Image (cartoon, coloured by chain):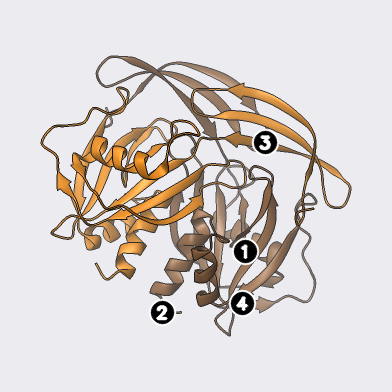
Chain colours: A brown, B orange
Amino acid sequence: MKKFEEITTETEKIFDGKIVKLQVDSVTLPDGNTSKREIIKHPGAVAIIALTEDNKILFVEQYRKALEKSIIEIPAGKLEGVEDKPAVRAKRELEEETGYTTDKLEWVTSFYTSPGFADELVHLYFTDELVQMEDKVAGDDDEFVELMELTVDEAEQMVKEQRIHDAKTAYAVLFLKLKGV
Amino acid sequence: MKKFEEITTETEKIFDGKIVKLQVDSVTLPDGNTSKREIIKHPGAVAIIALTEDNKILFVEQYRKALEKSIIEIPAGKLEGVEDKPAVRAKRELEEETGYTTDKLEWVTSFYTSPGFADELVHLYFTDELVQMEDKVAGDDDEFVELMELTVDEAEQMVKEQRIHDAKTAYAVLFLKLKGV
């Protein structure tokens, strides 16, 4: 028995989409009472903290329909199924979204983004060995992104002004500050 | 027109739950093509970075049904509707989950946790002026949490071992390291 485990008595599958699944689990709580849990299943994602030779961080601006606005994030992308390897996907997303590639991606950490309702796990990588690619790599055809290169001071200022307000990106800025960038 | 704006042509409402809503938006992309966006609506949440007098960080361990395991997080809770004020909710969650209260909560930042598919915004607060409460404040009756107090070094070690692997909590550990805790 796991600590405070909630035992599933019924799973109602509500939605099975291209990216997320939604189910409602009926559960028995540790005290014997019952409750319902709304759960989003997500394939997981990768994100890349990428530092150029002249100590600039790579960001991309893109429209996020869930927010109805464009926001500034570090390069990222979701895993395409369980076979998709995070490190391979991270390199691919870096190439597609920034036009840079690398042969050195260090794993930094992996974290759940919204454990209260979703199982999305983001794998975070770091590179400071970027190589500009000659040919652009085609990405998803429904994705429009604009590359930005900012110093850590500029990025920090944008966090303060809430122009950067994305969890993985806010984490990346602190990570680089701690590195002394 | 917002940058890279995606124009909604149809919204299909799939689920309206106790916590999340799910809809699928049909959109027209900047290049005129069409796509679909699966979107989770969430009321938003608060989280508290709380430091005791002897420089320990407050964490709670709780079962997260979406992950089918207990994880270690900083105290947090979702907003109860649009009227709920983040700073008030943050104080309340601190009291309910830890048995401490405070009259000084500093706003640190607010970030979207999963902008690719959800609009959840987490408001993060900091306090280092904790007062132990005499009487326990009752929390949600379907919530079971265990309080932990760890030094920043212990917490960092747990991030390394992936025993702490929650975005807001990983952020909190870096935030305190940068503060020199």
Q: Which residue is mark 4?
A: A130
Residues under labels 2 and 3: Cα distance?
A: 39 Å
Determine whether the residue tagged by mark 3 lies in a helix, strand or loop: strand
Label disc, if present, on residue A180 of the rendered structure: 2
For the point 58% across and 34% down, the residue is B41
Position of residue B86 measured from the top left corner of the image (x, y, whole percent) = 41, 43
Placement of A97 over or under B35, stated as above or below: below
Residues under labels 2 and 1: Cα distance?
A: 24 Å
Label disc, if present, on residue B38 of the rendered structure: 3
Query: In the rendered structure, the residue with mark 1 lies on which chain?
Result: A
Is disc 1 surrounded by few (<14), some (14 to 19) or many (20+) residues within 10 Å?
many
For the point 50% across and 57% down, the residue is A168
Marks 4 & 3 on one chain: no
Between marks 2 and 1 in the image, the one whose residue lies nearer the viewer: 2
Amino acid under disc 1: Lys
Marks 2 & 1 on one chain: yes
Residues under labels 4 and 1: Cα distance?
A: 11 Å
Amino acid under disc 4: Leu
In the picture, measured across the screen, residue B33 lies left or right of residue A85, that is: right
Q: Nearer the viewer, residue B77 or A33?
A: B77
Q: Quarter of the image containing the C terminus of chain B?
A: bottom left
Amino acid under disc 3: Glu
